[in-house]
Image (spheres, rainbow, N blue to C red):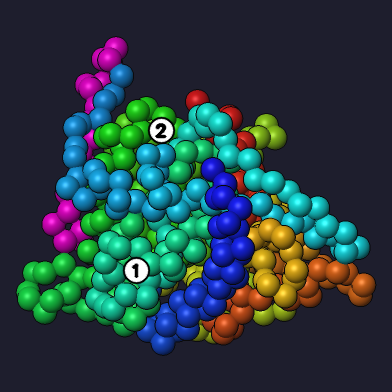
Amino acid sequence: MAAGPAATPRLGRRCARVAVLLAAVATALVVAGCSDDDGGGSAGGAERSSTSSTAAGSSTAPTVAPYSSPTYSDPVNWLCRPDRSDDACDIDLDATLVRADGTTEVQRFRPAADPAADCFYVYPTISADPPPNSDLSPGPEERLVVANQFARFGSVCRLFAPVYRQVPLAGLSALGATTTTGVPGAPTPGQVAYGDVLDAWRQYLANDNDGRPVVLIGHSQGSGHLTRLLTEAITTDPVARERLVSALLVGSSVKVPGAPGAIPDLPVCTERDGRPATGCLLSYVSFAADAPPPDGSLFGRARDGQGRTVCTNPADLTGGAAPLDSYFPARPDQGLSTPFVRYEGLLQGRCTSDPRFDWLEVTNTHAPGDARPADVGGRITPVWGLHLIDVNLALGNLVDLVGQQVRGFG
């Protein structure tokens, strides 16, 4: 899956710009003051899941009803999928492990030869297209965020990532708009975006899944759309629910089970007999230990004030503090030969809360003489915490967790 040698230097430079692009995301979101769901309301005419099951007690296994999307039946409208000729996940993912004493180790990425499960990913707000919605032609920013957040899951699953008409950076102020076009009854920008995610999911489930276990992965706007997908099209569908290994809804304020408006029939991931549970959800928002959520923070609390939000430490599902396994795009000034750098244990995470917020508290363990950075970045404004690097700071833990869940599924 790795890109050829000629592509490696170019990828390294592009990956180094991911943080800059994500910084633009957060800046635009602050100005807009948007909801982290980025897609509330109805689906603007999009139908619910087309899956169907046999009658209770039948000896025939539940099946998926036929479905063909005019958009997502064409591989060109996916960033990643096994039959995509120009796959955004088929890149150089080698990383250099940097230790506290300054020694380094180049670690080659090994894609799974025959993965037992699939991963379905919806990316965060990243498009530089004009509002109200992005188009279906991905720019370098969409490809970069896939490289930065999702491609590494190729070591444990087949990868599916649709392009969708998300609410772009420049259009976030339109999230609360009544319509996209000004015509009464027309879908809002968030409804257009969610309609694409639903359409891509239906195409995948009916034509690509083939009964395989599946993991949902999202960040920020992507997590908001997946939260809705789980509520409307997966937990209500016995076929899809049975195949769900887990849902990683990172960088979004997901309500705890039982709270008003929480995803139904989906517990929080914990450990059972020393192994991670399956059929569950993981979610967290991250803040530095020295900068907890301040008044006005948009993450870590239910926007409607009803119920608490989920915090799952991907490094320790029992809730304790644990070292994080971090992957970041390598910077040109680091002089590394790989496009990514890995810091194993530089950061430590633990879930914490106060009377208002629930979040993953991230501590940098850097000490005098440590060759690793005392600040890994990701800070734009206190109300957003470490939102830019929610996935990066625990990417190794997330990939490892998915691998364990896939092996223990069924």
Q: Position of residue 352 (x, y in %)?
A: 65, 65
Is 308 left, or right, of 120 in this rendering?
right
Q: Is residue 305 visible?
A: yes
Q: Position of residue 280 (x, y in %)?
A: 49, 43
User: Residue drawn 45% across and 61% down?
Assistant: 143
* Mark 1 → mark 2, Cα distance in angstroms: 26 Å
Q: Position of residue 248 (x, y in %)?
A: 50, 51
Task: Rate crowding at label 2 as few (under 14), some (14 to 19) or many (20 or more) other CA atoms within 10 Å.
Answer: some
Which residue is at the front of the view, 44 or 57?
Answer: 44
Magenta residue span: 36-60
Q: Looking at the rendered structure, which numbered label has been put on residue 267?
A: none
Please name the predominant secondary structure of the magenta segment in the image: loop
The answer to if 57 sits in the magenta stretch is yes
- Do the numbered discs 1 and 2 sit on residues whose CB atoms are within 8 Å? no
Question: What's under tag 2, amino acid-wise?
Answer: Arg
Q: Is residue 65 above or below residue 318?
A: above
Q: Is residue 332 above or below residue 265?
A: below
Q: Looking at the rendered structure, which numbered label has been put on residue 38?
A: 1
Q: Position of residue 28 (x, y in %)?
A: 42, 82
Which quadrant of the view contains residue 59? Answer: top left
Q: Looking at the rendered structure, which numbered label has been put on residue 243?
A: 2
